[in-house]
Image (cartoon, rainbow, N blue to C red):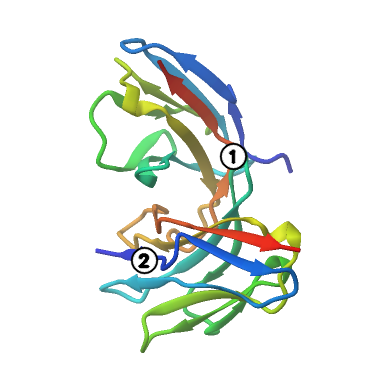
Amino acid sequence: KAGVTQTPRYLIKTRGQQVTLSCSPISGHRSVSWYQQTPGQGLQFLFEYFSETQRNKGNFPGRFSGRQFSNSRSEMNVSTLELGDSALYLCASSPTDRVGVNEQFFGPGTRLTVL
Amino acid sequence: AQSVTQLGSHVSVSEGALVLLRCNYSSSVPPYLFWYVQYPNQGLQLLLKYTSAATLVKGINGFEAEFKKSETSFHLTKPSAHMSDAAEYFCAVSDRAYNTDKLIFGTGTRLQVFP
């Protein structure tokens, strides 16, 4: 099976712009989560989607949003970019047989740099 | 609320030496615990997980971890380090909230292996 794919791998944007990141989960996985990784804050949970519904949300401002499509692919959007949004954004998918104990399979991430 | 603490942001060992990476958890319910590894410019890969079955958990690449409730610990060990083990290691606990796969990560431990 192909792993989790994320596009693009690298992005450079300027302050005030918006950005959309894409994630394709492993075939058959219906749960997709997003995490932000920075040197200062570490790995922080952004949100989780299951069957096109947001199932859980982290403590991020409303500029961060996401969605999931019927084929389980997910996108996240960040509007009005700030310098502090520079980070590695990781997407993870998981099977749904036992929520909470599932292994999350991570993609390689999208490295976002805000200038 | 669940949390994990990783003692030591950097650990250095010689090739062939014992690897010990420390993780302590805080949880109001029986925890589900995970160790992930991250190689440079890659996503996270699961090493092993504890989900209330055997307290000694064996993972990939020769790693294992022991769940000790009395010490609220889930330390990661490997008897003999290899150069290829150099990476960042993250301990994580499942949120255990209803119907979520959300993971709460520790701050990570960077492992260096010297020849």
At horizontal 52% and vertical 19% (from top left) the residue drawn is A11
Q: In front here: A3 or A112?
A: A112
Q: Quadrant of residue A64?
A: top left
In front of the other: A45 or B86: B86
- Give the residue pinned by disc 2: B5
For mark 1, give the secondary structure: loop
In the rendered image, residues at marks 1 and 2 fall on the same chain: no
On the image, the x and y values in percent for residue B77 come to 60, 76
Residue that carries the numbered disc 1 in the rendered image: A107
Q: Position of residue A7 (x, y in %)?
A: 58, 24
Chain under disc 1: A
* Residue at the image point whose x is 59% and y is 43% from the top: B43
Q: Position of residue B106 (x, y in %)?
A: 40, 59
In the image: residue B94, left or right of residue B16:
left
The reply, left or right, for residue B100 in relation to residue B87 is left
Which residue type does callout 2 highlight?
A: Thr
Count of numbered circles on the image: 2
Q: With A85 as the anchor, is A112 left or right in this view?
A: right
Q: Which quadrant of the structure image shows residue A51?
A: top left
Q: Chain of mark 2?
A: B
- Tell me what residue is drawn at x 58 percent, y 37 percent: A25
Q: Residue at left 33%, top 18%?
A: A81
- In the displayed structure, would residue B61 be above or below residue A16? below
Disc 1 residue crowd, few under 14, some 14–19, many 20+, Cα 10 Å: many
Q: Quadrant of the N terminus of chain B?
A: bottom left
Q: Amino acid at mark 1?
A: Gly
For residue A65, say whether it is visible: no
Q: CA distance from mark 1 to mark 2?
A: 24 Å
At mark 2, the secondary structure is strand
Quadrant of residue A100 within the rendered picture: bottom left
Point out the frontmost of discs 1 and 2. 2
Quadrant where the C terminus of chain B is found in the figure: bottom right
